[in-house]
Amino acid sequence: MTLTPRRGGGIILASFLLALLLTILPLPEWARIYRPQWYTLVLIYWTTATPQRVGVGIGWLTGIIIDVLTGTLLGQHALALSLIAYITHKMHQRLRLFPIWQQSLVVLVLLLIERVLQLWIMGALGQPVPTLSFWISPLVGMLLWPWIYIILRDLRRKFQVR
């Protein structure tokens, strides 16, 4: 049995840092409702592509960082991203076999699960119920999934991330 060194940790970290940067990037008021859940899309990709490296712990850590960056309740995103990472990890072998359009539908469901958890937490805190524009972001994420998948897959192959 030979152990191969793990490669490409910097690429995984860089993609998460870019997703965090895109999350806090200022946008005009009209464009904010269209901002996709970048961090969730990146988490879904890496959990599917490298489940032995990216999983629930990385989802939780990313969620805590998002909570700090966006000023939400500490643990709010951590709970949602941990659950998304768990679900993705459990079905990563099946998800890999799906054509990209079916993957987009699964990603939509995962993004909606994250939004439902966010809505549940907001309700538990007594915050006002958001408008229907709250649900546009998962649709945008679903439409962006093929490009995110292709870009991250090509980076993973180029830098031989295992």
Image (tube, rainbow, N blue to C red):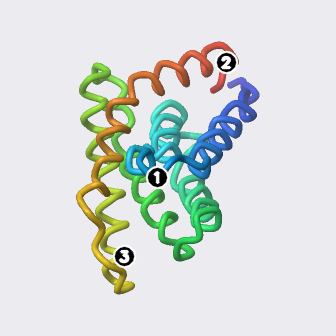
Rendered image quadrant of residue 160: top right
Query: Which numbered disc covers residue 107?
Result: none
Label 1 element class: helix
What residue is pinned by disc 1?
29
Is residue 3 at all visible to an observer of this figure?
A: no
At which x and y percent is residue 72?
A: 53, 72
At which x and y percent is residue 52?
A: 56, 40
Is residue 150 at all visible to an observer of this figure?
A: yes
Above or below: residue 40 compared with residue 119? above
What residue is pinned by disc 2?
160
Label 2 element class: loop
Rendered image quadrant of residue 145: top left
Q: The disc labelled 1 sits on which kind of residue?
A: Glu
Q: What separation in Å lies between label 2 and label 3 (alpha carbons)?
A: 41 Å
Which callout, 2 or 1, points at the residue further toward the start of the chain? 1
Above or below: residue 36 compared with residue 160? below
Residue at 61%, 21% (x, y): give it.
156
Q: What separation in Å lies between label 2 and label 1 (alpha carbons)?
A: 40 Å
Q: Residues within 10 Å of mark 2 (few under 14, many from 20)?
A: few
Which callout, 1 or 3, points at the residue further toward the start of the chain? 1
Left or right for 54, reference 134: right
Q: The disc labelled 2 sits on which kind of residue?
A: Gln
Q: Nearer the viewer, mark 2 or mark 1?
A: 1
Q: Nearer the viewer, mark 1 or mark 3?
A: 1
Q: Residues within 10 Å of mark 1 (few under 14, many from 20)?
A: few
What residue is pinned by disc 3?
122
Left or right for 102, reference 91: left
Residue at 26%, 23% (x, y): give it.
101
Label 1 close to label 3 by CB (< 8 Å): no
Above or below: residue 55 compared with residue 134? above
